[in-house]
Image (spheres, helix red, strand yellow):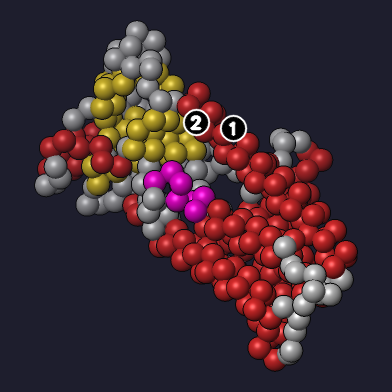
Amino acid sequence: MPLAGLVLAVMMAVMTGSPASASDPLRLKEGFRLLKLTSYMRTLESGGHVFAVQNGSSQDLHLVLHRPPQNDLAIALGLQPASGPVLRLFSSDDREFASAPGASEKLRFNIPAEQVQTFFLPQSGGVASVDFYLWSPEALASHESNRQTFHSTVLLLLMLLLLLAIGVGIMRRSRRAAYAVVMAVGLMVLLSSLWMRDILPDNPQFEWLLVNRLDSIRAALAIGVAMSLVAHLNLMAQQIVNRNYWTRVIIVSDMVLVAFGVFWVWQIYAPDFAGLISAELNEIALAMTCGTVLMGAIFVPDRRRA
């Protein structure tokens, strides 16, 4: 975008009736880590956003513009496009920045030392409805590392519960515990597929898993839904052992599963409804559903006592 076009866009922004605070330069220094940028951006009537940043340090300031990640389950079900729009940013010194291929939610740019620059972010693919965050590269790397550790820990705990549930199901000879284990396996595969980009190391040998990630999400979701229907139908249509116990297990798991559905739909229509944890809430609820089902299989009463 030529410099004259950017200046024209900025002039249009000044002429609009936006709040005065949005036009003030945002002063940042070396210790900067994280800021929600949306409130400092001016929306243009012609489309796109404008914001200004002042580098208050004596060194170049490196920043990352970040938007919430897409909803992978919605992508697998065809409710959202498979790839998000590429972020592009134009600066007042006629530079252009663009997000890297495969990482369309992050855009790295820099501001020379002790300069004030205005940036124009074109509107693309519904970007106007998304909140943006401004990170330092170090703070973003730390956040992603903490998220990876959290996801890996949750999956490890669920795997331990799964092994324990399998052992208890065999020892107690409980068919319903076997159903619960199969349902939990489906939910675990679904959860692992949703977290795959975070937990897998950056290695070419895992590329085939990432390529087939959406297919594994669909298959795991189908298994989890099918086993949930089987559990409900068995509870209603058959005389089963420990009916009261399994009724409580199913009710609790259904409540958590409803929470997962609510957070998932909420994220589709409002990707940043709860800030940085918006994308995590539905996945945490899914992990809790899986854990509830496995705990039900682990603590199933002995058939002989029943």
Q: Point out the image quarter for the C terminus.
A: bottom right
Question: What is the residue that sits farthest to the front in this orientation?
Answer: 305
Find numbered disc 1 in the image and state the secondary structure of the residue it sits on: helix
User: Which label is found at residue 298?
Assistant: none
Question: What is the residue that sits farthest to the bottom in this orientation?
Answer: 237
Give the camera-side residue of 94 and 158.
Answer: 158
Q: Image check: 14 left or right of 243?
A: left
Q: Which residue is at a point 25% across and 37% down the rendered structure image?
A: 40
Give the camera-side residue of 258 and 265.
Answer: 258
Q: Which residue is at a point 81% across and 54% down the rendered structure image?
A: 163
Instruction: Give the residue type at disc 1.
Output: Ser
Figure quadrant of residue 237: bottom right
Compared with 256, 95 (above or below) is above
Q: Image check: 77 left or right of 178?
A: left
Residue marked by disc 1: 145
Give the camera-side residue of 105 and 183.
Answer: 183
**Residue 300 % position (x, y):** 74, 67
Q: Image check: 304 left or right of 6?
A: right
User: Which label is found at residue 140?
Assistant: 2
Q: Which residue is at a point 72% across and 85% down the rendered structure image?
A: 234
Instruction: Give the residue type at disc 2.
Output: Leu
Q: Which residues are magenta?
A: 275-281
